[in-house]
Image (cartoon, grey):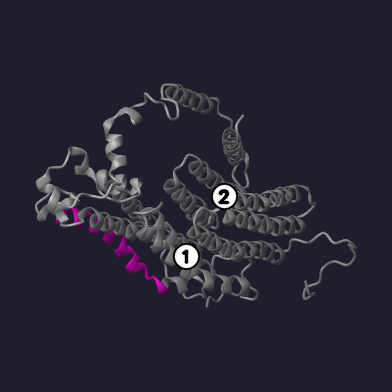
Amino acid sequence: MKNHVILRIVTKLLIPYILLYAFYVLWHGDFGPGGGFQAGVIFAAGIVLYGLIFGLQAAESAIRPRLVQFGVALGLLLYIGVGIASMLLGGAFLDYDALGYDGQHHGILLVETGVFITVASVMITIFYSFAELVRSQ
Amino acid sequence: MSGEQLIDVVLLTLLASTAIAIARLRNLLATAMLTGIFSLLGACWMLFLDAPDVAFTEAAVGAGMSTILILAALCVVNAEEKPSRESPMALFTVLLTGGVLVYGTLDMPSYGDREAPATTNPITRIYLDSAHAPVEYEEDHAAGRDPGDAFAIGIPNTVTTVLASFRGYDTMGETAVIFTAGLGVLMVLAGARRRRPDPITEIDLEPADEGSGE
Amino acid sequence: MDGVREVLGWLFIVPGAVFCVIGGIGLLRFPEFYSRMHAAGITDTLGAALVLIGLMFQSADWTVAVKLVVILFFLYMTSPTAAHALIHAAYTSGHEPLLADDGAPRQKGDTP
């Protein structure tokens, strides 16, 4: 790749901040605009940028497709797990008050993390599938 | 016309003209770019309506991921849309559906209407007051709380509270929908995962003379 | 003090908006791709930077100003990179610039 130096350097500078910003949006969703959906898409956008500039194989060796496929289900399991945990602790399904002191805060945080994992994994999986389609042409 | 109305009119005009351009163009690469621009304008529109969370998501998904995926799909198909036949039946169906939708919106309350159900229903007050800090469990259990404070959750962002706590079931359904969409894409495109021993070619902007990633 | 800050902010925002409009006019009126990218890239970076600096003056809290500095930093990183990527892609796929003395055609191996 002859002249992609500028793109590579700028991408190397920016990707850590993009991923960090995704986590910031996730955990500050309680205090400002944000939440799980936005954070998942921003995280996936960072990984997609890495895959575009450095090659699909580099991206797939950083975030393996098997791991991402596992993450698709893990997020939803975490969400439903929070609901079942509150049932086991005596409340109704998804009743965060049963999770103990400051249960609402912790419940919302866990639930948003589950949404983040699912959304990021689904976006990365879709990108990998499309890119494999292009590559195998 | 006040400044806000002017921004309103300009944004909606830009949205409408971008949509018309998307429908009329035959070059698919230009259409992909215009779809990204439409999403960005839609995000500005939502920010103008005081909905930053939705604007955030629309900008990230529409102007970011969606454009990349459409471009990746364009690598596999023709870059030019085939000319479509004129069909008066299709035009009539579109006009009928659009007309019925516009007729439906005539019944909606005005923006910020005092008598609208969104303003007068007590649940709105409960949602908005949930940002108060919750009562200390030990003392005020005994002191007796009034029912409004039972819903005090203490998280400043009301949208997150409504999304994750008050309407948690709906968000679980949304997450399940996203999960199903990912599953569907994996099932449809799984056949493309054929490992070939050739050197790696990237999704690239320049003609591939050699292709080694790093 | 607040009035001075607000006036100072407007002193930056209005020229920034004017530069953005100039960039838009240049985008429409220049004859070919490379000069249009030049107009768009330079004037939009300058216009956006002036608007953000004006907003920094008008911000209510110092934390908002710090976040605006970070936004300005990211804008300066990504906007010229995007312009570079576009022009590089156009150049290597053979799009010829419109030169003033359009004499000899471009040879392979000429310095751009």
Quarter of the image with the N terminus of chain A is bottom right
What residue is shown with label 1? Answer: A18
Provide residue C97's location: percent of width, then percent of height. Answer: 79, 61
The residue type indicated by label 1 comes to Ile
The residue type indicated by label 2 comes to Ala
Q: Residue at x 46, y 74 (%)?
A: A58
For the stretch drawn in magenta, the main secondary structure is helix
Q: Residue at x 39, y 70 (%)?
A: A63
Residue A112 picture quarter: bottom left
Callout 2: helix, strand or loop?
Answer: helix
In this orientation, which residue lies closer to the viewer: C25 or B84? C25
Badge 2: residue crowd in 10 Å (few <14, some 14–19, many ≥20): some
What residue is shown with label 2? Answer: B32
Q: Residue at x 82, y 68 (%)?
A: C106
Give the spatial CA distance, label 1 vs label 2.
Answer: 24 Å
Residue A42 in view here: yes
What's the chain of the residue with tag 2?
Answer: B
Provide residue C13's location: percent of width, then percent of height. Answer: 65, 51
Residue B201 in view here: no
Provide residue A82's location: percent of width, then percent of height. Answer: 20, 56
Height in image: B5 above or below A88?
A: above
What's the chain of the residue with tag 1?
Answer: A
Task: Please provide the residue range marked out in magenta.
Answer: A61-85
| Residue B70 belongs to the span the image colors magenta | no
Callout 1: helix, strand or loop?
Answer: helix
Provide residue C46's location: percent of width, then percent of height. Answer: 68, 58
Badge 1: residue crowd in 10 Å (few <14, some 14–19, many ≥20): some
Height in image: C12 above or below C106?
A: above
